[in-house]
Image (cartoon, grey):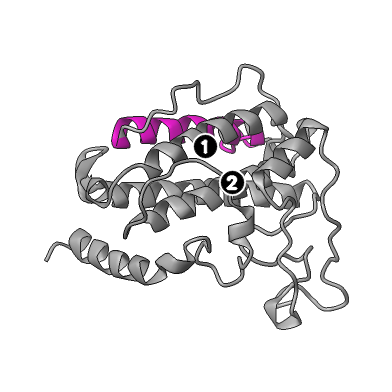
């Protein structure tokens, strides 16, 4: 059996078992993911691949949460002034354009709007990506299970659409993680992405909290429109080291 069909069959079985609690994004520490999902956007019937759109709903919010933690003066920051490294602004451009290109060319999902904003500041990047990804979410949720199993072109090979979409999710997570490193380099507080950070309480053994900067997309957009700064306070790691190897 081809490996992609084996993977699809296993994923489908797992997804079917999880359908009653599809609001959860699958990470035990991300126990409030259902609350953080954006409202609305698509009304397709639930099926074995619905977990992919449920995941996209929370992943797009996680990306916006990380972006919101930067200040406008941070957007030109280039670590060590190394030309091989993107600035936060260039990361936001890449995320916006790359996701738009993958979705349109590989999956034929077109948000029908420019991927990047005309004015390249933090707020406009957030608003544009929120709108474009929201439209993509709506279109993806209308797709039946059969659509996700059909093959499409992934660069120079053929792969199931579900496989391509999963690669897109991991690609976005990869770049988002790079930006969390930038936040550390800038000495910015780091809120949760999936689970605790050193700023939200440290290691799991210390029973820290998972603290998102904002509870949902509406709160994020409203707060950022007003200039941000209304995020939840963070406790920090306390007296215990935030690493297993201090």
Task: Judge the density around disc 2: few (<14), some (14-19), many (≥20) Cα neighbours within 10 Å.
Answer: some
| Nearest the eye: 229 or 177 | 229
219 in relation to 5, above or below: above
| Nearest the eye: 202 or 26 | 26
Q: Visible in this render: residue 154?
A: yes
Residue shown at 51% from the left, 26% from the top:
115
Q: In this view, does 100 lie to the left or right of 164?
A: right
- The x and y percentages for residue 93 are 56, 30
Q: Name the residue under label 2.
A: 38
The picture quadrant where one finds residue 99 is: top left
The picture quadrant where one finds residue 47 is: bottom left
Task: Judge the density around disc 1: few (<14), some (14-19), many (≥20) Cα neighbours within 10 Å.
Answer: many
- The x and y percentages for residue 109 are 36, 33
| Residue stretch in magenta | 82-107
Residue 228: say if magenta: no
170 in relation to 3, above or below: above
Name the magenta segment's main secondary structure.
Answer: helix
Residue shown at 64% from the left, 66% from the top:
195
Q: Name the residue under label 1.
A: 134
Question: Of the residues under marks 1 and 2, which one precedes in the sequence?
Answer: 2
């Amino acid at each position: 059996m081809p490996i992609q069909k084996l993977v699809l069959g296993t994923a489908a079985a797992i997804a079917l078992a999880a359908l009653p609690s599809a609001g959860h994004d699958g990470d035990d520490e991300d126990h409030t993911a259902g609350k953080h999902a954006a409202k609305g956007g698509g009304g397709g019937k639930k099926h074995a691949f619905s977990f992919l759109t449920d995941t996209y709903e929370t992943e797009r919010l996680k990306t916006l949460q990380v972006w919101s933690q930067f200040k406008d003066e941070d957007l030109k920051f280039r670590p060590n002034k190394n030309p091989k490294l993107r600035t936060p602004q260039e990361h936001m451009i890449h995320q916006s354009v790359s996701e738009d290109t993958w979705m349109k060319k590989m999956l034929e999902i077109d948000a029908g709007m420019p991927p990047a904003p005309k004015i390249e500041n933090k707020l406009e990047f957030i608003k544009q990506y929120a709108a474009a990804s929201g439209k993509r979410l709506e279109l993806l949720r209308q797709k039946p299970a059969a659509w996700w199993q059909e093959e499409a072109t992934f660069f120079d090979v053929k792969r199931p659409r579900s496989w391509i979409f999963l690669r897109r999710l991991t690609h976005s997570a990869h770049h988002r993680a790079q930006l969390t490193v930038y936040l550390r380099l800038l000495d910015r507080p780091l809120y949760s992405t999936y689970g605790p950070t050193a700023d939200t309480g440290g290691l799991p053994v210390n029973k820290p909290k998972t603290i998102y900067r904002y509870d949902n997309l509406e709160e994020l957009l409203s707060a950022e429109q007003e200039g941000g700064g209304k995020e939840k306070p963070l406790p920090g790691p306390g007296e215990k080291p935030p690493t297993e190897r201090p």
